[in-house]
């Protein structure tokens, strides 16, 4: 290459470089990148939306429910004894025993209630013969006793030494009160007081 050719080539190269530099300098800057909230930035970075937890309101307290009246149906002597035993240890009364059939018993042992809650016996006009062997009920509690539509015959309170022998059919030993409604007692005996019913320390209402 001659000196003249070299000079022309150099001039063309410088001019091309100037044009490239001018084009690069005049380019507008790229707009900033906006990242949507919650979008991933890079492989592992996440911009999470802040959350606000609403205050927790405690539920209004509910008063305890009152104990409903307990009722047991009995149709024979065994169920009658079991009901008296169950209610004698149950303080959630009042209690009701509903007699649904006729049954006699002459065991020589008095069915006894010792619970703290009022007891009602619904007899449904069934008759119970006791064979002069025992009472129908010894109520050894200060709770109230209600006898309704009950028929008892041939009950007996035997003389047993230091044990009370009052009330041939029913011996109420408490102070809360005894109510007898539409009931009948026939041929009952007691070695001491109250041939049919004894309630020595409580008011008695007979209807």
Image (tube, helix red, strand yellow):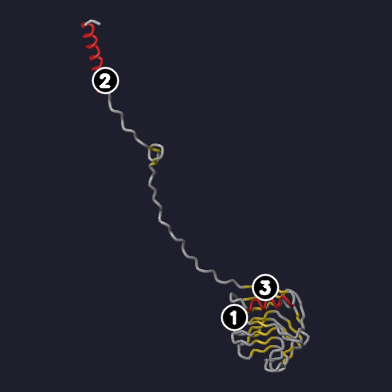
Can you tell which of label 3 and label 2 is closer to the viewer?
2
Element carrying mark 1: loop
53 relative to 148, above or below: above
Q: Position of residue 156 (x, y in %)?
A: 74, 89
Label 3: few (<14), some or many (≥20) within 10 Å?
some
Residue that carries the numbered disc 1 in the rendered image: 116
Element carrying mark 3: strand
Mark closer to the chain start, 1 or 3: 3
Q: Position of residue 196 (x, y in %)?
A: 71, 88
Quadrant of the drawing holding the N terminus: top left
Task: Place residue 154 in its image quadrant.
Answer: bottom right
Residue that carries the numbered disc 3 in the rendered image: 72
Label 1: few (<14), some or many (≥20) within 10 Å?
some
Q: What is the C-alpha distance between the residues marked 2 and 1?
A: 106 Å
Q: Is residue 149 left or right of residue 47?
A: right
Q: What is the C-alpha distance between the residues marked 3 and 2?
A: 104 Å
Q: What is the C-alpha distance between the residues marked 1 and 3?
A: 17 Å
The foreground one among 122 and 90 is 90
Residue that carries the numbered disc 2 in the rendered image: 23
169 relative to 60, above or below: below
Task: Place residue 142 in its image quadrant.
Answer: bottom right
Mark closer to the chain start, 3 or 2: 2
Element carrying mark 2: helix
The foreground one among 74 and 110 is 110
Q: Is residue 195 left or right of residue 67?
A: right
Q: Position of residue 165 (x, y in %)?
A: 69, 92
Q: Position of residue 139 (x, y in %)?
A: 65, 84
Q: Is residue 207 left or right of residue 62?
A: right
Residue, x 27% and y 25% (percent of image)? 28
């Amino acid at each position: 290459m001659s000196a003249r050719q070299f000079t022309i080539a150099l001039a063309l190269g410088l001019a091309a470089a100037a044009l490239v530099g001018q084009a690069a300098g005049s380019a507008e800057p790229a707009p900033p990148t906006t990242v949507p909230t919650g979008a991933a930035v890079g492989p592992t970075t996440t911009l999470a939306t802040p959350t606000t937890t609403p205050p927790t309101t405690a539920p209004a307290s509910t008063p305890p429910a009152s104990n409903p009246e307990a009722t047991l149906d009995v149709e024979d002597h065994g169920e009658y004894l079991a009901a008296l035993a169950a209610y004698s240890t149950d303080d959630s009364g009042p209690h009701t025993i509903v007699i649904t059939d006729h049954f006699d018993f002459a065991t020589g042992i008095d069915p006894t209630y010792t619970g703290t809650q009022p007891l009602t016996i619904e007899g449904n006009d069934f008759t119970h013969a006791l064979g002069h062997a025992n009472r129908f009920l010894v109520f050894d509690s200060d709770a109230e006793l209600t006898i309704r539509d009950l028929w008892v015959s041939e009950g007996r309170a035997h003389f047993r030494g230091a044990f009370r022998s009052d009330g041939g059919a029913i011996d109420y030993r408490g102070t809360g009160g005894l109510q007898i409604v539409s009931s009948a007692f026939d041929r009952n005996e007691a070695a001491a007081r109250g041939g049919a019913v004894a309630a020595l320390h409580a008011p008695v209402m007979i209807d």
